[in-house]
Amino acid sequence: MTDFSRRQILGAAATTALIGAAGFPFPVLAQQGRSSVTLAIGRDIQGLLTPANRVGAIEGNIMRAVCQGLIRFKPGSFEWELSAAKKLDQVNDTTIEFELNPGLQFHGGFGEMTADDVKFSFEQFGQVGADGKPAGYAKDWATLDHVEVTGKYTGKILLKSPAPQLWLVVLPDNSGLIISRKAFEAGCYRSDAQPIKLIGTGAYTLAEWVPNQRVVLKTNPEWKGAKPTFPEIVLQPVRDPKTAELALRANELQFTPVEPADAAEIQKEKDTQLLRQDSINYVWIGLNVEKPPFDNPKVRQALKLAIDVEQVVAGAYNGTVKPAYALMAPGLLGYWADAPKPKPDPAAAKKLLAEAGHPNGFKCTLTLMNKPTYQAIGQIVQALLGEIGVQVDLQVLDAGAYYAIGKGDTGKNLDMALQRFGGKADPAFQTQWFVASQIGTWNWQRWNDPAFDEASAKAASTNDKAERNRLYIEAQKRMEASGAFIWLTHEANIFAFRPWLKPAVLPNGDDMLYDRFTTA
């Protein structure tokens, strides 16, 4: 898979900031009225605009405004409601029956949505590309056997095995979006084509894309649902948080994510409101268990005892986030409420290092991305480990270089890496990145534990909620015992916006419902 995507984090190739004639760091749009709203996005569109091969959350947010799924999330929650489907029922462990609402028209003259489009969209995840590789998000529909079309608007989703995560990670999310078979076969959905054509039946159309400058969504004249508040939404690529801050103050943006550490100052600004929500994402320091000295469990445990997590998150996030002690965030199935909360103990850490053959410590490198918050984390960790004789060099990389460094054989050279992954509503999404098959892809710890892999697989293939909860806690206990993971925080999502705007952000903070942004 194009694994940049699943993390909803990505290594963009180049900065999106441009120097305008007036010296402003990005193209200044004319003052927008309430008929239009300008929102910040972290980078420009990349890759294919199809559910099966999208790059990440930025493409996904645009696609879910333009395309419909059978069901969709409600604003601000992981509860779902019907969308393109008139009915959607799980009739047994491996069969889901659907009936479409009739009359849903793909814009651009590509006709009515039918059950055949559903079949095409979902089965595309199982197709191998021209490069011989599976679709980027193939794992989302790995349990799909096939879709049986039983009528113009009806069909059955037939599974190889139970897959409870479909109802939270797939069907109401981007991998459940439905595209037009006719439009796909006509060459639409390609970002290397200009003008780009993203064809759907949703509330908006992708009206304009000026690379590295703006993406413009306009209301779909054929949309039969509730009319969106804003006839036009302008998405402004701007990578640097400080640049976005300045643009918000100048009212060139009306909505932007902000760094948690900057939230208190931004809130003082006139006509600015903050939305803060606890996140289900996860930030941690991963240790490469294949590389000396981190292949020694005593070394891993020593580092864990030396790093005061509460001090790290208080300093780097300015008191706006809570510490994390395991993979699953509070509120998720599999949340391990009794996870150990170790107290820092530098003396015990030094003793362990001596027992491991490093009485005078050692030198190593912590690799991290060049975000201000992450650099602050790196500096605090550097100081804490220095107290036990471990000299840490910080390798600070831009996004593209960072996401390449843990892949393939290159990843064997990592010592430690500060990582952040985006969470989803079902724990199957979180655990899948740490199985043995992800070594060289997203398992940068290069950690191989068959018991973890088995627990994760069993939990993903049973509909018994209590058993799933037990298995996910067991999986996290295996992670804890490895010493390869030093959990830091689940983050908090903080957004700044004009008081007259009411954003629609899903609980993971990465996913937006642009069609549900309204006025307050």
Image: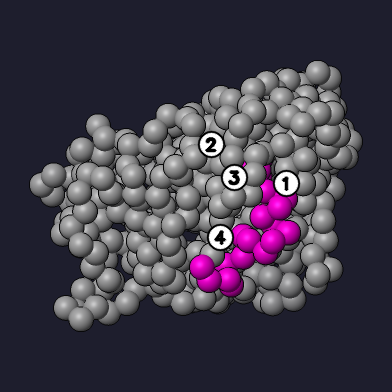
Q: Mark 1 touching mark 2, by CB under 8 A?
A: no
- Chain part drawn in magenta: 172-195
CA gap between label 4 and label 1 equals 16 Å
**Picture quadrant where residue 276 is located:** top left
Which is more foreground, mark 2 or mark 4? Answer: 4
Name the secondary structure under disc 1.
helix
Name which residue lies at 66% across and 55% down.
183
User: Which disc, if any, is residue 121?
Assistant: 1
List x then y, in percent, for residue 107.
55, 47
Query: Which label's residue is closer to the chain start, 2 or 3?
Result: 3
Residue 180 highlighted magenta (yes or no): yes
Q: Mark 2 touching mark 4, by CB under 8 A?
A: no
Kind of residue at disc 2: Ala
List x then y, in percent, for residue 388.
49, 64
CA gap between label 2 and label 3 equals 38 Å
Name which residue lies at 40% across and 50% down.
218
Name the secondary structure under disc 4.
loop
Residue bearing mark 2: 329
Relative vertical location of residue 119 with respect to residue 420 in this rendering, above or below: above
Kind of residue at disc 3: Phe
User: Within 10 angstroms of label 4, few (less than 14), some, or many (20 or more) residues?
Assistant: many
Kind of residue at disc 4: Lys
User: Which disc, if any, is residue 106?
Assistant: 3
Query: Which label's residue is closer to the chain start, 1 or 2?
Result: 1
Name which residue lies at 23% across and 68% down.
28
List x then y, in percent, for residue 487.
54, 49
